[in-house]
Image (tube, rainbow, N blue to C red):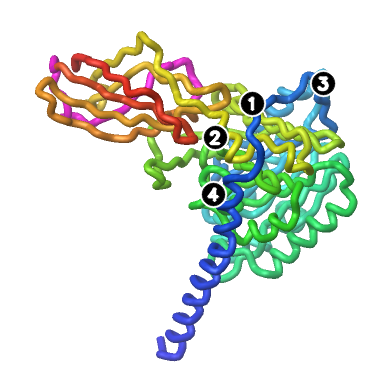
Amino acid sequence: MDSYLMAQIKNWAIGIVFGVFSVLFAVLPMQIAALSMGKVTDGIPGAPDDFVPTVRMVIFTDSHNRNEVVADAIDTSYELFDDDSVYPGVDAFFGLGDFSSVGGEGDYVNFVNTLKEHVREETTLVNIHGNHEFKNDNYDEYFRKYFGHDPNTVTDVKGFSCIAFSGTRSATEWTFTPSSLAWLDKAISEAEKKNDSKAIFVFQHPHPWGTVYGSTTWGDPQLNIIFAKHPGIVDFSGHSHFPANDPRSIFQSTYTAVGCGSMERFELEKNYIPGQHPDGVDPAAQMNVVEADDDGSVRIRVYDLFSDRFVNDVYIDDANDRSTFNYTYKNRKANDKAPVFRPDTKATAYKNEGGEWVISFDEAQAAEGYIVHNYDVTITDSNGKKLICEKFVNDYYVFDDDDTADFRIGSDTLSSGGEYTLTVRAESAYHKRSETLKLTFTAQ
């Protein structure tokens, strides 16, 4: 490669890095300010008994070729709502991208065949690109061929403007171009002119940066600049794989941002470091049920397909009026409480089939609507020697009848028959910490 071309590539790379950091530094003060926005309320009210939607949509994201889970999501949605006495039926399905692995044509064929077999003809169906679809140079051709609509499109669903935004791949697999962002800005502006008091829904693959849980790593700050100009939108995104039942999966500032979880596996963070995949994160299967009325009210429920239950339920009284927002970071943190261990909490240690020691103790109880995100654990032997000092992410994304916290600590950490002391503190999503608990146990 000649020196001129090398210099051009170097300048191009520097330009991209400079551009990204310029946008990020422009957004950072705005997002820091958002953490202190809003009022503090005495509790967070749920949907009123007389809430009657005029539209119902189901959203799923990041299935990564797990088309059997997509089929289950669609079938389950119809089963849940076909005979709903308040508002029967499902009006639309929205797929938020990464239905593929590398964007090959075969992935499109398999995904679309699943949709054709399970989505009814009368139900609106809209998809967008994720970064994994952008890995293939033919992404635009395949999208139009198999989905039959533009990657950036506005769909009217029962009178609600639904803006699906894929963007356009630029130099890397995931960067919105100025022209695609201009399209998004214009589409929202046009929806605002005609939507009266209804909420405006926006769908794209990555989170707006610094909003919902996972967005500081898996978000795009370019979106923030557009969304900050349009108070009142309700935005849905995926990409991070962070659990949608985490209370931080909804974030309100001047608008509402919602993280939609994953249909493949979960990702989490530990000590503020993302990329954690502890036991139970694979496989995942969460979908979002969104209901709205004509006066700006929106209800969003997360449904877990493995346990067949709703695992999160939020209600926005008026998406257009930020003075009514309950799901600001400030208010959510104020209403969170430190987890509490039951007085009779016990701990045990045993070896699993793989020969690893497993520490098991009764879970701490989180405040209603909140979670225990992690446990700080220390284990000492009978001589007071510290053997383990670790932070373990809690499996709050797994819904079963097991009410114990279980953590593997290696095969040679403990000795059978030995006496040990476990010191543990539970920490909530908003960093509220329990009292320190000390338990003694014998390694079995």
Name the residue type under label 3: Asp
Looking at the rendering, the stretch of residues picked out in magenta corresponds to 398-418
Compute the Cα span from label 3 to label 1: 22 Å
Q: In this view, does 328 lie to the left or right of 297?
A: left
The residue pinned by badge 4 equals 215
Q: Which residue is drawn at 22% across and 15% down?
A: 441
In this view of the protein, can residue 164 be seen by the observer? yes
At 40% from the left and 86% from the top, the residue drawn is 1
The residue type indicated by label 1 comes to Asp
Q: Residue 42 carries which label?
A: 1
Which callout, 2 or 4, points at the residue further toward the start of the chain?
A: 4
Taking depth in this image into account, of 329 and 295 the one nearest to the observer is: 329
Q: Which amino acid does label 4 sit on?
A: Ser
| C-alpha separation, residue under disc 2 versus residue under disc 4 | 18 Å
Q: Which of marks 2 and 3 is nearer the N terminus?
A: 3
Callout 1 secondary element: loop
Q: Which image quadrant: the C terminus?
A: top left
- Quadrant of the rendered structure where residue 73 is? top right
Q: What element carries label 4?
A: helix
Who comes first in sequence, dot 2 or dot 1? 1
Whichever of labels 3 and 1 marks the residue nearer the N terminus, that label is: 1
Number of the front mark, 2 or 3 = 2
Q: Say whether residue 43 is left or right of residue 375.
A: right
Q: Is residue 215 left or right of residue 403?
A: right
**Label 3 residue SS:** loop
Give the camera-side residue of 200 and 267.
200
- Residue under numbered circle 3: 50
Q: Residue 122's spot in the image, x, y percent?
A: 84, 37
User: Mark 2 = which residue?
Assistant: 333
